[in-house]
Image: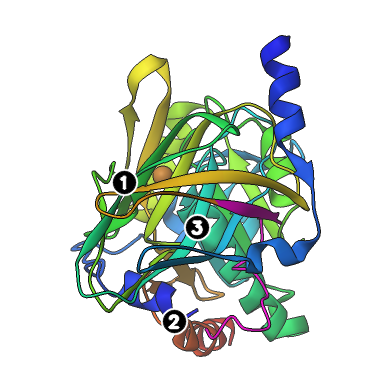
Amino acid sequence: MLGVGAYRTRNRPARSEVLPVPIGQMTWTLTDHQGRLVRPSDWAGRPVMVFFGFTWCPDVCPTTLSDISLWLEELGADADRLIVALISVDPERDTPDVLAGYVSNFDPRIIGLTGPADEVAQAAADFRATYRRVDKEGGDYTMDHTAGVFLFHPDGRFASIIDFHEDRRFAVPKLRRTLS
Amino acid sequence: MKHFLLATTLIFSAPAAMACETVTIGDLTVEHAWSKATIGAGRPGVFYVEIKNSGTTDDALVGITTPAAGMPMLHETVVQDGIASMPHAMSVPVPAGQSVQLAPGGYHGMLMELTTALKEGDSFPVTLSFEKSGEVTVNVDVLSLRAEGPDCADAGQ
Ligand SMILES: [Cu+2]
């Protein structure tokens, strides 16, 4: 996997000037891959890991979810209290059913979240994440989106971001610090 | 329907060892070609490979074709200011004496308009076009959506 590291380090790290707001101050309402409504208050008292993506994404998203799955396996039962969510930036195509088929390929603790465009926009605003639609020839489109993984402490405070290019050796220790 | 039947006969089940096959053209060695399973044929597939240039002349991968996709393209995943995008790559440099990888998070073949869903365990051919060395075809092994690369005994990675 040396090549992956080599390619990832070519990219510039994330530099967000504004930090995500605490989970308790977020105002979005989304639907999970099993059709249940989820609000930030449902996550009170639990550590949180959130990633923005979409299921039509062939490279960044499955790679991140594979990485997350490996981290969760390494943490084992320690990560059972951790909320792990993929928030779709492509709700037009990512219905709860579509998300269900997708997340079933990864660690079962990962949930998929989607919803109306304005709720997804609210979630992105709360996390200080960005995304934009990129139209391609023939009516098809793809999405550019924030690639980092957001971590929050059990009390809802923002902890840190695991950048996409970041050496994965640092991910699990970062996660452990978030869990406690 | 004729088109569909043609497509299904070109994608066949093969042992997992396929990804470990090595093909050469001129000074180039092409190996560890793999892809990820897709959910249906509507989503794009992906193509990863490793190319070694043992010669003294720079070369470049300028295109890919495959019966598995109507619109295969070279892309590069770029993360800038934390935002991931994947612009079209006109070519992938393969400098003299160096190795280049199309790998998760970097350069990749983007297989748009799949003729059929890619299933774990399947295999399909991809023809790589090099600026100087010409064309060479390699068999691509479809791994799971979760896979991070082929498991080759001689992988050396
Ligand atoms: Cu791509």
Q: CA distance from mark 2 to mark 3?
A: 14 Å
Magenta residues (range): B138-157
> Relative to residue B68, is residue B127 depicted above or below?
below
> Number of marks in the image?
3
Secondary structure of the residue carrying tag 3 is strand
Give how far across and how far down residue A50 sits, in percent: 51, 60
Q: Is residue A33 visible?
A: no
Is label 2 or label 3 in front?
3
Ligand 1 lies in quarter: top left
What's the residue at 53%, 36% (across, down)? B66
Q: Amino acid at mark 3?
A: Tyr
Residue under numbered circle 1: A130
Q: Amino acid at mark 2?
A: Leu
Is label 3 or label 1 in front?
3
Residue under numbered circle 2: A2
Q: CA distance from mark 3 to mark 1?
A: 28 Å
Badge 2 sits on which subunit?
A
Residue A35 figure quarter: top right
Q: Is residue A131 visible?
A: yes
Which label was assigned to residue B48?
3
Q: Determine if the magenta segment contains residue B154.
A: yes
